[in-house]
Amino acid sequence: MSGPIQSIERAAAILRLLSGRSRRLGVVEMAGQLGLPKGTVHGILRTLQSVGFVEQDRDSGKYQLGAALLHIGSSYLDANELRTRALNWADALATQSGESVRIGTLHEKQVLIVHHVFRPDDSRQALEVGSLVPVHASALGKALLAHHRYLLADLGSGPLPSYTPATITDVKRLGHELEEISGRGWASEVGDLFPGVASIAAPIEDRRGVIAGAISISGPIERLCESTVPRGELVGYVMETARTVSRELGAIPW
Amino acid sequence: MFDHRARLVSVAQKEHRHIYPMPGWVEHDPDEIWRNVLTVVSQALEKAKLSPTELSALGIANQRETTVLWDRRTGRPVHNAINWEDTRTDRLCQQLAEEYGQERFREKTGLPLSTYFSGPKLRWLLDHVAGVRERAEAGEVLFGTMDSWLLWNLCGRHVTDVTNASRTLLMNIHTLDWDDDLLSMIGVPRAMLPEIRPSSEIYGEAGVALAGVPVASVLGDQHAALVGQTCFHPGEVKCTYGTGSFLLLNTGDRPIASERGLLTTLGYQLGSSRPTYALEGSIAITGALVQWFRDNIGLIGSAPEIETLALTVEDNGGCYFVPAFSGLFAPHWRSDARGVIAGLTGYINKGHLARAVLEATAWQTREVVEAMHADYGGALLELRVDGGMTANNLLMQFLADVLDAPVMRPIVAETVSLGAAYAAGLAVGFWPDLDSLKRNWHKAAEWLPKLDPEVREKGYRKWKKAVARTIEWLDEDDWLAADLVSLSGTQ
């Protein structure tokens, strides 16, 4: 049997680098990190690009993983499967918190609601499955963005749409908040989308450690928050449920 | 385990083995089931960090009709339990029907003579296990469905409840007692039968392992779901969607004889109050069709993906799928029918097929709902649903559309367990009354009909035409090979 093929090993190293935290890298950065000549890295990237395994961002010239690769490797989690697997736990979160529960996934720079459990009272509520909410003004969106931060660039550099005076419209400020969110493991919005309404969300991980979606509770600010800070008990419920659903999906327990 | 507000406190589950000694035979090991019950109870307690002394009551909900015989003195089963889906009594049932006629059984029990029910299974054991008949006549060998077996082991009493007894073909549903005429026709000695009690009362105290917790409810699974869904008023309907689906309609304090092949059964009996009756309609193939589509056709990798595939198209494109895999059941009852996919054109793609697969569940539900209301009167006001398929949003919306009634999913999906807990909690005063249970029922989701009535009725018309095309598929020479199925499929 012949030994390993060097160029394939190098291509693998480049792909691994691009699947890391920063997600988008230039040729010089990659060459530096891999200790390879720039020309070599560039040649490999062009080959990978021709088969769709990497893509080059037109504006910045940086490289990222390509759609073809994502399709091969991921067999990404079906949104309807996510709902099915999360059903019991989302119900339990609604009864525990007394608030409505939603599960969302990223969908073309917005959050697609894939599951919705009514607030367990007898009020009239309409099912929101299939609706879209803005990624920067929802707790679900922020929880998802915090783990897919390369998407932040897609939101553009100008001010983001404002829904209430509390909406974060500055991309830089949003970036800072996302950093905090990924550190503590949960996101919130307090009146960012609708005045008087708050939400708390946490990410759901699948068996490959990829963030497959996020789960949230929503309700009046005075029920969800102590002044404007989300109540610790409720944050605990949301995070615990996200962990349980992740375990259900086969994520390694943490 | 549930708390006062019917919130799920803890869940534990364990599968037990299916034993297949021969084609068509299905058995369970009663000892294994008893051991598993003890294991899951202690696991559920452990998870919630509770001790048995903190439990108010214990309830039992069980798969119905499965038959166990055991030795009164040693407590040892004399044979494996014969499972409800076991068809070894096929010939026996035919013989009984020829000898006495279906009507005699239906009038007294509300059931057709079928392999599903316990009586014929019990008779088979009496005929085939050496020495058992003599010992049964002497009261040394006892009969029970799974609830009786568990109660015997939990608190040493030989008891069953009205709902389980109503599935034996041995109990008269009007008197709620074993019927001597039925016993002599099927050939069962009375001495071996358990005492029939209400579904909710303190039967006894659980043994040492469970610190004497009162055992206070017994319900067949579908009856427990009716209670868990708090369908306490006549006219209220629940449907549990699994591989097969089960609709139960509360008919109040009168048993309604069905003219459309539905089962007349006990809903529940709580303490000393009058029994509540129900009409039951089962659909053999619902979730099982999605599984078939996944496993045998391979267009999807997991059952939930059917929804994703179905959403790639706007509608069924005129395509209908009637899963009469082993004949048509309620309300058609045609064992010579086989499945069809109707309305195929060059336009149809896999998305349309996925739609047709999902829609089959909704159309079949409508047929059973219509049969129920033709027997009972009135019209469907709303349908309460539970079970795995309720996670399918597209299906639930379509169900509301074809029924032209709101479809509601409760926030506690485990309605079978909850029903057992409710009945046990009522018996010990943990909950004061049915109203307090009603207050615990909360909608987790509601789907409202929004389909244009013209589109709906055209769809139903086409469905019925597709159903008509399944009939008379089997020929004389097919019958030898075909399974003769006389009732519903999976439970």
Image: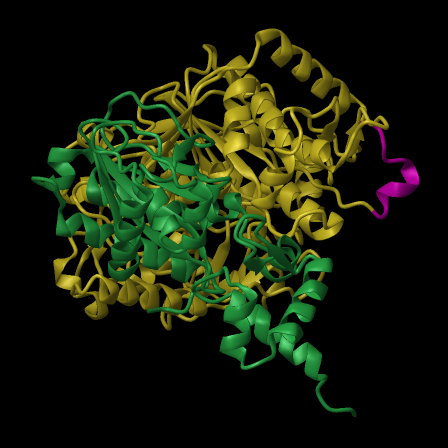
Chain colours: A green, B yellow
The correct choice, above or below, for A209 with respect to A131 in the image is below
Magenta run includes residue B75: no
The residue segment tinted magenta is B470-481
The correct choice, above or below, for B135 with respect to B168 in the image is below
Q: Position of residue A168 (x, y in %)?
A: 27, 38
Q: Position of residue A176 (x, y in %)?
A: 27, 52
The residue at the point 54 percent across, 48 percent down is A59
Front in this rendered view, residue B484 or B110 = B484
Front in this rendered view, residue A6 or B446 = A6
Residue B126 image-quadrant placement: bottom right
Residue B157 image-quadrant placement: bottom left
Magenta run includes residue B476: yes
The residue at the point 39 percent across, 54 percent down is A204
Q: Can residue B490 be seen here? A: no
The correct choice, above or below, for B408 with respect to A18 in the image is above
Q: Is residue A246 left or right of residue A218?
A: right
Q: Can residue A117 be seen here? A: yes
Front in this rendered view, residue A125 or B114 = A125
The secondary structure making up most of the magenta span is loop
